[in-house]
Image (tube, grey):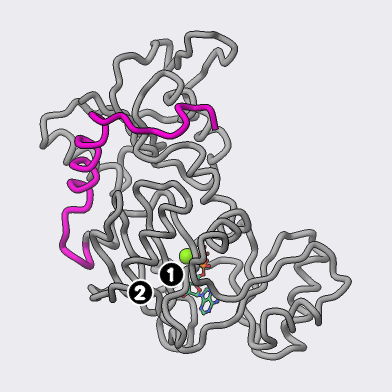
């Protein structure tokens, strides 16, 4: 196969591993920086230009679109889809997953367990909003945050009100969520490929911290997940329409709760924690499914 990896940096661990495993299996692999692509989007025969060249002959595109380039990156991916190139994750699915409110609404529709979550735009009735999610302590999240930045634990009602009012005063989009204390500062990252969880790790926050992000000093270890956790992760990825996804779960007293679904899950943490060749499994899955050519939208989404 001729594989395009949509990534801004070929030196990132995940990109490097996908190149390596693609080449190991006899494929031609090229890294394409989406920001250097330009396109005539009105043409009936869609093409992509790149550093003066017209991109041609690709069978597969593996999107690794960073959060900061979602808008342009998904447009380039859509153009690949219109050209008939098989996307490992479709642009519509990535767009869904990048919108925290939209993804929680989609998960709710499929009956996937989640922490009770509320959102509002105006500070009119902050105490009601807090009551709606079960009262303090609550977790308040900035919608555009990543890597744990913009996630705040407010222990008391007063603290929650102040933080919510402050964020709203800054016109920041937020959601307010039930705090899952039993999780004990840990979460479970399930790596989904197709309809299977192929690897899972537990991330534990350092002492005195409730956020388990590795960027916040969390540590990762191999974990065995239950059949219910497995089912929940696969259902969540399916609800988004993602073939490759990182589904983050909290272990609560009422079962697994989905926190978020990541459309470009990093490979470094999961490969190191589990010793599994996740990049190779992605290439394997791609080989099988590219032949079937089953995509939902072909850029129509
Ligand atoms: P980000 O997108 O910045 O990673 P998350 O929603 O994943 O934000 O939250 C960061 C971390 O905070 C999670 O990995 C988890 O450890 C902790 N956390 C988030 N929400 C809750 C919650 N409702 N209850 C308990 N812990 C939470
Ligand atoms: Mg997270």
Number of disc labels: 2
Residue bearing the label numbered 1: 213
- Could you say where residue 193 lies in the image, as x and y percent from the top left? 29, 51
* Residue 119 in the figure: left or right of residue 82: right
- Magenta-span inclusion, residue 42: no
Residue 45's place in the image compared with 240, above or below, is above
In depth, the one of 65 and 229 nearer the eye is: 229
Tell me the quarter of the picture where residue 153 sits: bottom right
> Pointer 1 and pointer 2: residues touching (CB < 8 Å)?
yes
Q: Tag 2's secondary structure? A: strand
| Residue carrying label 2 | 203
Residue beneath the point at 80% across and 80% down:
128
Q: In the figure, 82 relative to 269: above or below?
A: above
Q: Does the residue labelled 2 lie within 8 Å of ligand 1?
A: yes
Residue 83, horizontal then vertical, whole percent: 41, 18
Give the percent coordinates (x, y) of residue 100.
Answer: 59, 57
- Image quadrant of residue 160? bottom right
Label 1 beta carbon within 8 A of ligand 1: yes
Q: Quadrant of the N terminus?
A: top left
Range of the magenta residues?
A: 272-301
Secondary structure mainly formed by the magenta segment: helix
Q: Quadrant of the C terminus?
A: top right
For residue 285: magenta? yes
Q: Residue at x 37, y 39 (%)?
A: 9
Measure the C-alpha gap from mark 1 to mark 2: 7 Å
Q: How crowded is mark 1: few (under 14 residues within 10 Å), some or many (20 or more)?
A: many
Q: Answer with the quarter of the image where residue 150 lies.
A: bottom right
């Amino acid at each position: 196969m001729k594989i395009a990896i949509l990534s801004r940096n070929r030196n990132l661990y995940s990109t490097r591993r996908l190149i390596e495993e693609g080449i190991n299996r006899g494929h031609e692999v090229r890294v394409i920086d989406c920001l250097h692509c330009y396109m005539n989007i009105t043409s009936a025969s869609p093409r992509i230009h790149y550093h003066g060249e017209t991109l041609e002959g690709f069978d597969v595109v593996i999107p690794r679109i960073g959060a900061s380039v979602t808008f342009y990156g998904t447009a380039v991916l859509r153009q690949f889809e219109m050209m008939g190139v098989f996307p490992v994750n479709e642009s519509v699915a990535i767009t869904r997953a990048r919108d925290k409110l939209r993804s929680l609404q989609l998960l709710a529709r499929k009956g996937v367990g989640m922490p009770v979550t509320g959102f509002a735009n105006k500070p009119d009735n902050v105490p009601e909003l807090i009551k709606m999610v079960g009262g303090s302590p609550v977790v308040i999240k900035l919608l555009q945050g990543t890597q744990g930045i913009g996630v705040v634990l407010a222990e008391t009602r007063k603290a929650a009100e102040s933080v919510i009012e402050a964020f709203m005063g800054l016109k920041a989009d937020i959601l307010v969520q039930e705090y899952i204390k039993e999780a004990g500062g840990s979460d479970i990252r399930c790596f989904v490929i197709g309809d299977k969880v192929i690897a899972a790790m537990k991330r534990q926050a350092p002492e005195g911290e409730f956020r388990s992000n590795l960027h916040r000093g969390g540590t990762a270890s191999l974990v065995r997940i239950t059949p219910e956790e497995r089912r929940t992760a696969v259902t969540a990825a399916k609800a988004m329409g993602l073939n490759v996804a990182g589904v983050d779960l909290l272990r609560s007293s009422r079962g697994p709760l989905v926190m978020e679904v990541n459309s470009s899950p990093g490979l470094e943490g999961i490969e190191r924690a589990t010793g599994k060749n996740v990049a190779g499994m992605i290439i394997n899955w791609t080989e099988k499914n590219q032949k079937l050519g089953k995509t939902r939208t072909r850029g129509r989404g």
